[in-house]
Amino acid sequence: MMIIQLCRCYIILYDLHSDIPIEYLSKIFSYLLEIASRKKESDEFKKQVEMSLEVISFIDYHVTFGKEQYLDEIKGIIQYHQMHRKLTQLAYQSAWLFLLNRAVTERELKDVIVNELHFVEEATRELEELTECVNWKKKEKETDELKILEGWNKALDRYIYNCRIFVEGKNLNLMTAIVKLCEASKTNHV
């Protein structure tokens, strides 16, 4: 786990000082992607996968990788979760954030995000589930559920900005889920 934290530090440093060689970042990215692709079910492995995907999602979209370096792996991670529901909510959301960030510079990802991975349906389902399970009365300002909701808010922002695709009928379901979430938070004074 410490190595994942070190990778995170490097990514932050890379973002602050662009004169650090991209080759190092590329190797770190490959390492984190390898960890994120693990399909073991123990809590320890799930935490490592979650941390790896969260760190990967921090990589700025200006840092370019060839799609061949990540697309099949990230698609595989998302599709595996869609079939088996093995990732944590944070890990799943982080995989989406990474892919949605890449859509800024790689426009052809829009088709993959919308038609192959079905982002709108997945985001709708996630928001509906979170709306039901968030403990709106909890006194602490930062609950895990609220952190997840904040991440989905970021993902939706990236989707709307980067993809700009209207999916007949499905966007309406997504907007309905967003409205219900807003109503729930307003009703509970969050």
Image (tube, rainbow, N blue to C red):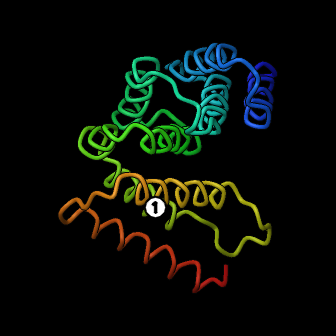
x%, y% of residue 106? Answer: 39, 37
Report whether 27 appears left or right of 118. Answer: right
Residue that sits furthest to the front in the current view: 19
x%, y% of residue 56? Answer: 61, 32
Q: Quadrant of the C terminus?
A: bottom right
- Closer-to-camera residue (149/55): 55
x%, y% of residue 7? Answer: 74, 24
Q: Eyeballing the image, is 114 above or below 56?
A: below
**Label 1 packing within 10 angstroms: few (<14), some (14-19), many (20+):** many
Q: Quadrant of residue 17?
A: top right
Task: Name which residue lies at 42% across and 63% down.
Answer: 128
Report whether 99 appears left or right of 4. Answer: left
Q: Which residue is mark 1?
A: 127
Disc 1 residue type?
A: Leu
Task: Name which residue lies at 65% across and 39% down.
Answer: 58
Report whether 34 appears left or right of 146. Answer: left
- Closer-to-camera residue (139/77): 77
Q: Quadrant of residue 51?
A: top right
x%, y% of residue 43? Answer: 64, 28
- Closer-to-camera residue (104/186): 104
Q: Eyeballing the image, is 151 above or below 41?
A: below
Report whether 108 appears left or right of 41. Answer: left
Task: Name which residue lies at 60% across and 27% down.
Answer: 49
Q: Eyeballing the image, is 115 above or below 9?
A: below
